[in-house]
Image (spheres, rainbow, N blue to C red):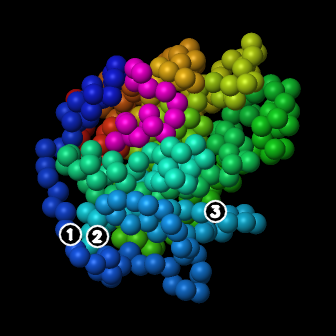
Amino acid sequence: MYVQDSSKAINLVKKKMLRKFSILIFLGAYLLFFKAGAQVVDEPHSFFRPQTLQVVGGQIFRYSLPFGEGERLVDIFVPKGVIGLKKVKTLYMHDGQMLYDSTQTWNKKEWKIDEVVSTTLARYAHDPFIVVGIYNDPSNRYAEFFPQAVAAYMPESYRKLLLEKLWNGDLRADAYINWIENTLVPFVEQQFAVSKKTKDRMVMGSSMGGLISLYALCEKPSLFGGVACLSIHTPMINYGMFEEGMVDALVVPFNLYLEQELKADRRHFLYVDRGTETLDSVYEPYHSLLLQTLANVGYDTDNPRFLEAIVNGAGHDEDAWADRWHVPLLFMISRNYSQ
């Protein structure tokens, strides 16, 4: 469904939402939530970590989980309205260090996850959920978020160039999503009172985070039931490396991969968007090709499980994503199949 701005996107989502009101149970102590099945890790594991993030309307639990030969930080936000509830939904988000507290981010911007949950989302009826923020590895972010299988569709010369310039000698996307599937998701579903069903897990990312989210849908369809890709980085490469051969070497292979591996079905929700300012302003031709490819595999304007947006005036940063991330969340979480 094509929308021109965030207000129209919200109206579309409202039409898609079930007209019901969930009864949210508010309890005075987080201990009651733990007794309901959301317990902090037992001490022998030593995954729990202290943190100093400033959030509203809930609580952050930080863990450091094994990742390869090292560790990966994860910040899990539990809204107050979820305390005491069971089988709640889970929103997994990439670039977890950018979600909650701008005083601790590199650019002093944030997604305002906690504020939006407490304000904007509080105005809508929706199922309860928690947010799992996965920290990125700054030096390997491009290698982890680039759809790894696409490399097989690329000219060898370009693969060698990117291995040297951007991938630090190795592609890491498969290792990253395997870790999410085999380590992170089981950990979250053991420690918190969340649903273990595919349809109740969602993933969201922006820019390259949008690419890895879409890649996860292709490679591991049983992992997430909803996928949201904000300002999805359809050029596939750093802006400073844009050149004439980029389309044939990267963009076309990516779309060929999608046509081979992605098929719309009755189980998965998909949202994609782009803005019109800053880096998003150069996305138009690549984004249009992506939309055509998605339509070819069944994610078109007639599919009630697909939503796309062109957000006029929106740029490529956390401020822009903070203004609209609730739109795909409501779309994915509402489960209303009506037009």
Q: Secondary structure at mark 2?
A: loop
Q: Position of residue 114 (x, y in %)?
A: 37, 54
Residue at left 46%, top 53%? 100
Q: Position of residue 159 (x, y in %)?
A: 81, 32
Residue at left 56%, top 50%? 105
Is residue 287 at all visible to an observer of this figure? Answer: no
User: How far apart are labels 1 and 2 at the CA level?
Assistant: 6 Å
Tell me, yes or no, whether the two marked residues, 3 and 2, touch with CB atoms within 8 Å: no
317 part of magenta stretch: yes
Residue type beneath disc 1: Phe
Residue type beneath disc 2: Ile
Which residue range is magenta in the image? 310-326
Which of 261/107 is in front? Answer: 107
Figure check: 59 above or below 272: below
Figure check: 218 above or below 115: above
Q: Earlier in the sequence, mark 3 or mark 2?
A: 3
Q: Earlier in the sequence, mark 1 or mark 3?
A: 1
22 part of magenta stretch: no
For label 1, the residue is 26
| Disc on res. 83 | 2
User: How far apart are labels 3 and 2 at the CA level?
Assistant: 26 Å
Residue at left 57%, top 24%? 279
